[in-house]
Amino acid sequence: MKLVSYNIQYGFGSDGRYDIARIANALADADVIALQEVERHWDRTNGDDQPALLAQMLPGYYTAYGPAFDMDASTISGGIVSNRRRQFGTMLLSRFPIHWTRLHVLPMRRMIDPLNTRNAALEGMICTPAGPLRIVSLHLAHVGVAERLEQIDYLLAQHASVCLEGGPWSGLDDEPDRNWTQGEPQPACPSAAIWLGDFNSEPASAEYRRITGDTPYHTGARYHGGFCDAAVLTGPRSKPLYTHEKIIDGVPRLRQLDHCFLSPILGPRVRSVAARNDEIASDHHPLWIEIDLESPLTS
């Protein structure tokens, strides 16, 4: 099964051209897609509703969208309000049902300089052939290490408490006449999770170590159940893995800012991790993960 994480920079490519169709074309053979920097109703993108456009362009997928940034963008004409929201956030697309979602609005520090904006993580419980999994599309702050560490700690705490909290609802429906459950069983809320996204931090950073433990190879329970780096699990590489290029003094610096972290139970199932560095539809490169989610999880 193929998973991909892609910061799409709201459809603007490294060539400076806006083309949301290029994003859809770059994702067409994935099974689960985690997107960041997806927006609705901004002037810079012609007022496009990008989640709706992507859903139209990728019709074989279930979709969910979670806005971190939400502002009024309504107009009024003849006494009728358009009720539009200017939004910026993360998105999940899956060939398998996204049974439930929840949006985690991440901690934020108020800034004087530079600009800082709200970040969020969209968590979806996806019914894969291997069983239910929680898959998170997230985007951490770009402004500094301290804020990113606060955001990671928040997400780790949420991960640690998921089995105690459960999903959207739990317990016996004592008001059957209200039909709260729609006749459905209690939603699954598995402990196993996959985090996909733009972490704005590189391997060996403080943020990276907060997620994986003291070393990238750590697979134990030191940090709220622990997470493994899928890229490390595939072994040594002949050339560096990178998902972003930044020109410094005329010289390109290659950075891996986008990652896939997963619960240790899923570690042995990772088959490959690669970035498609020839893709120019965004300033980031999509990170592709091939993982066995066809055979059932046994524990």
Image (cartoon, grey):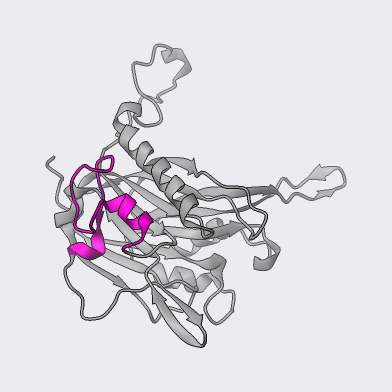
Above or below 17: residue 229? above
Position of 181 compared to 294: left or right?
A: right
- Which picture quadrant has residue 232? bottom left
Specify the farthest residue to the right. 78
Indicate the position of residue 42 as horizontal and vertical percent values.
67, 60
Residue 60 visible in the shown view = no
Residue 228 painted magenta: yes
Query: Considering only vertical position in the picture, is 204 above or below 251?
Result: above
Q: Quadrant of the N terminus?
A: bottom left
Q: Residue furthest bottom?
A: 250
Name the residue located 18 percent from the left edge and 54 percent from the top edge.
267
- Out of 125 and 122, give the one closest to the viewer: 122
Foreground of the two, 198 or 141: 141
Q: Residue at x 87, y 46 (%)?
A: 78
Q: 288 or 253, which lies in front?
A: 253
Q: Give the x, y percent position of residue 181.
A: 40, 24
Q: Is residue 294 above or below residue 257?
A: above
Where does residue 123 sit, x and y in percent of width and height?
40, 45
Q: Residue at x 36, y 32 (%)?
A: 167
Marker count (numbered): 0
Q: Is residue 216 magenta?
A: yes
In the displayed structure, 210 sits above or below 159; it is below
Q: Is residue 147 left or right of residue 29?
A: right
Query: Residue at the left extreme?
Result: 298
Q: Name the foreground residue: 25 vs 136.
A: 136
Is residue 73 visible in this depiction of the protein?
Answer: yes
Q: Residue at x 35, y 23 (%)?
A: 170
The quadrant the C terminus occupies is top left
Toward which corner of the image does residue 4 lie, by quadrant?
Answer: bottom left
Magenta segment boundaries in residue numbering = 204-233
Whole-percent x and y of residue 187?
A: 33, 31
